[in-house]
Structures are given as C-alpha cells and as structure tokens.
Image: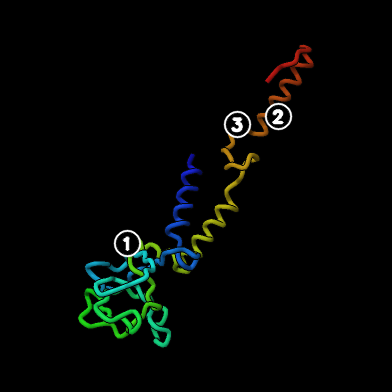
Amino acid sequence: MVWLLTLILAAGWFAFLRPTIWGGPLTYVVIRGTSMRPTYQPGDLVLVRREANYGPGDIVAYRVPNDDIASDLILIHRIIGGSGEEGFTLLGDNNPEEDIWYPTNSDIVGRPVFHIPAVGLILTFLRAPLVLASLAAGATVAIVLVPKSSDGGPAQASTPESSGRHVRRRRIWRLRLTIRHGAHVEG
C-alpha cells in the first residue's frame, strides 16, 4: 500500500510540480536577499509558473539580461509600470529605487504560484559540494558495510540457535540417536 501512495505522489509531482529544466511547468527560486520583504524572506522557496500576460502590481521572477555581469540570476520583484514589449519597470517591495533592468516578456520566468518559508535554506545547504560528497560517502559506506542476508533483506543478528556451531551439534546429536536407537529424529 505504501508503494501505491509513493507512486501517486511521484506522478502528481511529475505532472504538476516538475521543474522547467525537466520539461515541467514550474521554476524553483530561492530568495536570497531582502528586497521583497515582508512578502518573501531570505531562504523562502518560491515556485513560479509562466503566464501569457503580466501587468502592474504583479510579482514576477525574471532573468537578468545576458549582457550584464549578473546574467542568469533570477530576481523576484513587483511590476510597477511598462509593458512586455518595451520592458517592465520593476521594484522590490523593500527597495527604495527601481531596478536597473527592464525585462520584456521573454525575460520573465513566471509569476509566483506557491511559496514555502525557509525551505530554500535546506535546499541551498544540500546543494553544497561538501554536503553532497558527505551524503554520497555515507551512502557508499552503508551499502558496503551493511551485510545482506541470503533473502536480500538486511542480515539478522546471529543467535546461538542459528549459528553454525549449534547446527553442527544438533546434526551430530541426531546421528548418535539414530545409531544408538535405530530411530529417526525429526527436527
């Protein structure tokens, strides 16, 4: 029953929450600065979806243009003017000045549809090279050092009844009984 629930959850994630880099509808953005306080805090995870139209008042995520040193950064700010063809004027809720970039519709990644407070901190931590290497090393050690039983599951602790010495003694005892009494002992 657990496998069925897991399968349903995985199918739901694949259909509705898969990132755009895997052909899905959403982009995952981790908030790093304070420009959108109080709406978003540093470390929040924001899921954004591309829409057909955007306008003043909409919060959008956009890529910094390629000709800039900060290119490929994704920022989340509020549209305060402009158009998708000419370029939008954006402002962070906690910023005193407008952004220096004027993204067009093609630069906009999407509009936030959901956000999870502080989850971005965990994801950022897990993406660190040292953490990834440590997790990989731990998994490797667990695979190599944890013994497997003959049935494929984890090995059970050895008990005197299941040890080889005890099994041998039982066989010898049965053999002696058979020889002395001519009886066959079951078990």
Q: Residue 94's image quarter?
A: bottom left
Q: Mark 3 = which residue?
A: 160
Q: Look at label 1 and name its amino acid.
A: His
Is residue 149 found left or right of 6 in the rendered image? right
Residue 78, numbered label: none
Q: Position of residue 120 (x, y in %)?
A: 36, 64
Total numbered labels: 3
Which residue is more in the foreground, 120 or 26?
26
Q: Secondary structure at mark 3?
A: loop
Q: Mark 2 = which residue?
A: 168
Residue depicted at x 45% and y 61%: 18
Q: Earlier in the sequence, mark 2 or mark 3?
A: 3
Residue depicted at x 41% and y 64%: 26
Q: Position of residue 168 (x, y in %)?
A: 71, 29
Q: Is residue 35 above or below residue 171?
A: below
Q: Residue 33's image quarter?
A: bottom left
Mark 1 and mark 2 in contact? Answer it, CB < 8 Å.
Answer: no
Q: Earlier in the sequence, mark 1 or mark 2?
A: 1
Which residue is more in the foreground, 46 or 90?
90
Q: Mark 1 = which residue?
A: 115
Please, which colouring scheme is shown?
rainbow
Q: Is residue 156 above or below residue 175?
A: below
